Amino acid sequence: MEGSRFRAVYVFLVPAILIAAAILGYYTFSSAREYAQLGESAIVQSLLSVAQQRVERIENYVIFADSIVLSLVDPNDSSTIDARWLPPAEARTPSVKAVLMVNLDGDVLQWASTQDRKKRRGFLRVFRQYLVGSMDLGDLESDELRHLHESVEDVSYLISYKAYATEDGQVTYVVAYHDTEYLVNEVFPKMFVSDISAPLYNIVNESNQRVFGPDLTEAGVFTVDHRFPTTLYRWRLQVAPRQAALLQAQGRSRLRGEVALPVMSFAIILLSAIFFIYAAEKERRLNQLKSELMANVSHELKTPLSVVRMFADMLRSDRVPSDQRRLEYLDIICRESERLTSLIDNVLDFSALEGGRGPYRLKRGDLGEAVKRALDAFRYRGEQDGVEVRLLTPGRLPPVLIDQEAIALAIINLLDNAVKYGGQTPVDLELTPRRSTVDVAVRDHGPGIPKHAIRHVFERFYRGTHEVPTRGSGIGLSLVQHIAQAHGGRAWARNAQGGGAVVGFSVPIAGPERAAA
């Protein structure tokens, strides 16, 4: 019932923890991402302001040149183009390479140019064939200044024109041709002075091809572009911070951190939840096993105590038919007392093991004496269960450094385990000297140990499966392992060839240095 309640708690607790961790990670990532976007937005807004200022300066440069041309040319007198504009043109309007007067039909009434003869003819041909038809002369209001920005034969042309009502009632248009090559080569470098603190600038056309400045494709999200509103409206000014690559790298690194932090937090919370559940389940299982231990120990104590009390009462009441029977009763009482002693020793040694104490006093001695003591204590149990215990020893054994009582207790536990799970088959107790140890092994001839249980036999409270319920506390073999390790040896368990299980331990041979220690 308690286990079901715990499992029900886990079923609701684990998903709740995971959902809470996921929500926390999501909001953490969202907040960090929002702050990063605010930082990027601040940089972009700053660059956009710079771009607007630069575009406005270029626009003002072109419009200022237009105003000079229009102030020098009188629409009522076509001769003013040659007389008043052409002489100071190179000095006052260097970007303007030609000035024309045209009528409403687009016919050129008068024109002049600062270019050589070949370029003048080339521009006049392009103007008549392509540009004048795109100028929308009929829609232009009087005194309204407009600009035409066209690309003809891969050459960019910028035209400024304004309509005037002349004295004879006609409409005359004053047209100024700006050389975009001059703007790119002479004007833009002066307006976009490059230094360490200034951002990077370039100008691209409608096909996204660079007209001026460096390539800014690596700047990524930090590139801001702004189109020229009235003059060079087919071009765009692009601005990017000089440290754009570093900002991009920092942004990627920050993004990885923003992703990694929630993921790591989620993983830590998940692992903590798993560990909590594992620890709680293990503690619950341990408490359950301890409860079972108390129940088993109580049962184990009750049987021999009942036997001792029964025979003691018979002896006290003098209801014994003969002296032979009296001796038999006394022998039973002694053996049951030894059984009680063995069980109590197991519990005491287990308590010492739980508290981390080492109660063993190692002395140089003979392992055979410990084996004899164990066999004498176990003889009644073997006779009662009808199991033959056979001792196999090579004869003389090398001296070992042991605690006689602890080793005897370990051997009794091995024999008790073999009788319980051996199915009333003979039990062999074999002593084998090795190079540096003496092995003590107990073999039964029963069904053996299941493969899945071999690695668990020395665990505390573990009890192997058996067709018939067996008594025991589940701490015997764990004490065997503890005793062996306390003596500097080891414990093992395996299935024997031909059937049965072999469980044993080893103790080191007492050498001069070990004896001195």
Image: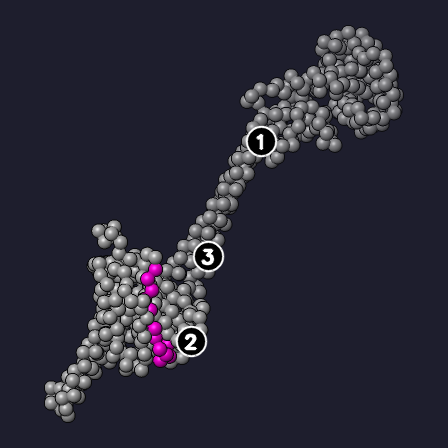
Quick check: can you spot residue 304? yes
Circle 1 packing at 10 Å, graded few (<14), some (14-19), many (20+), is some
Nearer the observer, disc 2 or disc 1?
2
* Residue nearest the viewer, comparing 250 with 417: 417
Magenta stretch encompasses residue 305: no
What range of the chain is rendered magenta? 422-434
Q: Percent x, y for residue 260? A: 49, 45
Figure quadrant of residue 219? top right
* Residue nearest the viewer, comparing 34 with 431: 431
Element marked by disc 2: loop
Q: Percent x, y for residue 165? A: 81, 20
Q: Is residue 487 left or right of residue 24?
A: left
- Could you tell which of marks 2 and 1 lies nearer the N-terminus? 1
Residue that label 1 marks: 245
Amino acid carrying label 2: it is: Pro
- Could you tell which of marks 1 and 3 lies nearer the N-terminus? 3
Q: Is residue 336 left or right of residue 141?
A: left
Q: CA distance from mark 2 to mark 1?
A: 74 Å
Nearer the observer, disc 2 or disc 3?
2
Magenta stretch encompasses residue 427: yes
Figure quadrant of residue 378? bottom left
- Residue depicted at x 78% and y 27%: 150
Residue that label 3 marks: 18
Mark identifier at residue 447: 2
